[in-house]
Amino acid sequence: MVLHCPADKPVDSFHEKNAYPALSEKNRNILKESNAILDKCRARAGMRTRNKMALILPRKGGRPSFGLLYIGAYLLDNYFEVRIFEFLDELYPPNTQYNRHIWRKLFEFNPDFIGCNVISSTAKIVQGLIAQIKNKIPDIVIICGGKHATSNPEDLLSHNADYCAIGEAEVTIVELLDALNFNESIDEVTGIAYLKNGAICRTGNRSVLPLDYLLRPAFELIDYAKYVNYRFQGIPGHYLRTGFIFGSRGCPYRCKFCTTQSREYYRERSIDDLIDEMESQIEKYGVDGFAILDDLFYFREERTAEFCKKIVKRGIKAKFFCHVRVDRVTRETVELMKKAGFLLLAVGVESGSQKLLDAMNKETSVEKIENAFKIYNEIGINTFAFIIVGHPDETDNDRELTKQLLKRIKPTHVPVSYYVPMPGTPSHDFETDQAKYLLGGVNFQGFSYLTDDPEFSTTIPLEELKKIGNDFERLSVINRNMNLFKYPAFILFITGFLIIHPLIIIEALYIRYISKKTHKMSLISVLKDAIQFQKQKF
């Protein structure tokens, strides 16, 4: 966490860039309108009386929150003082003590505003954070943003959040804080939701900015170098200094359990702008690989090919991890990806049953899955085949079809997720009416995104569902935890770490077998969690 004063303001505001291809008239108008808003706010910065903004990441994992880093860049550019506060995941009980330290730092900062990044898995956590903050600072203004705030603002506004930013909020947050400083009408601030006379008021959707004209994320707000060197959640199963980056926003597909309003506008950065940022991270942070965080990186074949050719031409030796689809595969492009350094491809297989693929609106087929993996395996690119278990229409036969498919396609790794559709999706609407595994068996308020235990309308007992998931994961060609040992740097790290922190093993044994306060099934996963959370204390 780093305090930034106005003197630290970046100088390369997005509207000062002029090295990109000509924009469409629509995007020129969007930029013109956004520039006018930001220029007005920046010009009045010296007259503001409330200037301190605390941005909260409610559950820190192994990857930084890019939503907060982009928001932070715009706040810094408009002369706000900003800190990011990262709370560790309290599903791992020892983190509770560490988080007390974060709370103390937050209240010492004494912010004028607090912003929370909210996804569905942290919605209930944020509700609890808001309650604690309002109890300590009743008059503080709390603004929530992110996917859950966009899809379900009522969840947060009904729990004492003051405003929700709807959709992409880089300009919205600056305009809102400016209006609040000068007691101006917030009805004119596009892209927010708030309570007015007890009812939710929405001010419409703000137009999205062309990605090449966004400010770069404010990595200086966090200890980004430690994220890069964290390695466990960079490229899964590999121990590389990993940077993180976005090349696009949104998703062009409409899977029933996944895509929500916050992701419906798909657009791409130019390849040159993307690679420029990669080179900047390599130079500044010594990055060896990149996790490309796009919902879907390989969408247009010509763009993927352009990226690979330019990576090779510039002599960049990094490794890459990205998300792809099985219906977007040609041998020529996959060969280019291999040559460019793509080490692992994440593929949403989901099921070996065509019935379930259709029910999820995956817009693909079992045949296409098999064809894609044939190409991946022959060319020699590792694969991450995501599988979903617990769909309400899933039968024993469907699970057997999935098992047989995995045996045929031989993915490198098989991570399994439980079927928990995101709020704002058609499948989630179904679950609110049909869910059987509700907390206390009474009402939908118990529907939980906080653990690996699903609560949905499947009739399969949860313990049985876990066993099914474990059986699928065992069909991985390579155990991704054991694969770490092929890296000498990991062997040196783990040896030194356990010498310095020998109690970590005892702690993991206690949590797994005595207190049973863990959502993980295997001892090796609990031990890995213990090591990871110890490393995250920065």
Image: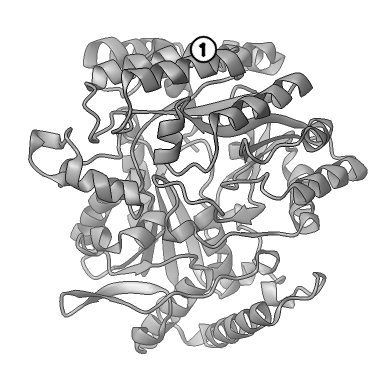
Residue 491 image point, x, y percent: 64, 12
Residue 26 to residue 432: above or below: below
Q: Quadrant of residue 210?
A: bottom right
Residue 335 image point, x, y percent: 82, 31
Disc 1 packing (10 Å; few <14; some 14–19; many ≥20): some
- Please name the residue shown 36% across and 79% down the image: 203
- Please name the residue shown 47% across and 21% down the image: 531
Disc 1 is placed on an element classified as loop
Taking 422 as reference, is 324 left or right? Answer: right
Residue 93 to residue 43: above or below: above
Residue receiving disc 1: 475
Look at the image and tell me whether residue 503 can be seen.
no
Taking 481 as reference, is 330 left or right? Answer: right
Residue 321 to residue 22: above or below: above
- Residue type at mark 1 is Leu
- Please name the residue shown 58% across and 80% down the image: 34
- Please name the residue shown 40% across and 47% down the image: 256
